[in-house]
Amino acid sequence: MPTLSAITLYPIKSCAGISLQEVTLTSLGLMTEQIYDREWMVVDSNGACLTQREYPRMALITPTIKATTLELRAPGMLRLEIPLGLQDPAGAPSLTTHIWEDTVLAYDCDALTAEWFTKAIGVPCRLVRFHANAERAVSTKWTNGVQTTTMFSDGYPILVAGSASLDDLNQKLVAAGRNALPMNRFRPNLVIDGIDAFEEDYAESYQLGEVVLKPVKPCPRCPMPSVDQATGEVGPDPMDIMQSYRAKPEVEGALCFGMNAILIAGEDQIVRVGQEIEVPLAF
């Protein structure tokens, strides 16, 4: 029987994730201790999102959820703690941010936080938090008309990958004289054991008890899998190996790994590592 083998929540877009044994699933994505996946984002002076694509050292910014703060650490930096309590939407400083083609209202974290991130990443930037009054709809082109929302994820609230898919890629990398890659290079939220390589692409749904996730769009990959998440250094890009067999015509030939998913049943239910998953196929 397929099982859920790993859960990772990324509080800050493009920074390190937090490995969890259990998590609450919501329509906005993963949530634990009232902290949502990709609830924060780093932006430049124009409010545009920064990612590891251009700034790979973001991988070294490591979050830890404390009782009342999100603690952040980075090499050579004093730790930073930002409060978890939401600000009053009426009076809190806010700014307009840009993530791909979307414009989103966000809380502007303070100047001390901006200074910390500027030093950690090496470019002027600020940390922002998804605003309580903001709403970012996903594209219904891929959801078959189902309307749902996300925070600062690239496009959909949950990313799912199968461990056998990584095994398959690693076999090809090793055969080409390259090093195998860990799953964190692809930054999925949920990892499934016990299904065939890339079977997640063809699933009708992923069902964990009362929770039903619907895979909606293959995840096109950018150069981020070439970033070593432990060192922040850029190494060989696996895209040349993926080129031979992971181009998806439904996304204009993009090289894909993992499936974007939305929640269609089981709002606020908890799922746990080791839990069995039903993965019925769509054909």
Image (cartoon, grey):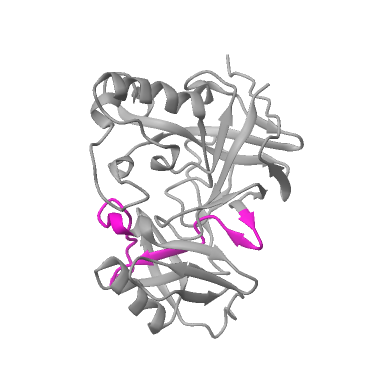
Of the pair 12 and 18, the residue shown nearer to us: 18
Residue at 37%, 49% (x, y): give it: 229
What's the magenta region? 31-57
Residue 121 lies within the magenta run: no
- Determine the residue located farthest toward the right in the rendered image: 210
Quarter-wise, where is residue 97 in the image? bottom left
- On the image, the x and y values in percent for residue 62 come to 45, 61
Quarter-wise, where is residue 108 in the image? bottom left
Task: Judge whether residue 235 can be spotted in this image.
Answer: yes
Q: Quadrant of the C terminus?
A: top right
Residue at 65%, 47% (x, y): give it: 21
Residue at 58%, 79% (x, y): give it: 87
- Horizontal side of 149 relative to 119 (left or right) equals right
- On the image, the x and y values in percent for residue 197 come to 48, 20
Q: Magenta part mainly helix, strand or loop?
A: loop
- Determine the residue located farthest toward the top in the rendered image: 283
Task: Judge whether residue 252 can be spotted in this image.
Answer: no
- On the image, the x and y values in percent for residue 30 come to 60, 50
Q: Quadrant of the N terminus?
A: top right
- Horizontal side of 261 relative to 254 (left or right) equals right
- On the image, the x and y values in percent for residue 182 come to 41, 37
Residue at 64%, 57% (x, y): give it: 32
Q: Is residue 272 above or below residue 60?
A: above
Q: Is residue 174 above or below residue 102?
A: above
Q: Is residue 17 above or below residue 6?
A: below
Residue 50 lies within the magenta run: yes
Q: Is residue 71 above or below residue 194?
A: below
Of the pair 124 and 74, the residue shown nearer to us: 74
Quarter-wise, where is residue 44 in the image? bottom left
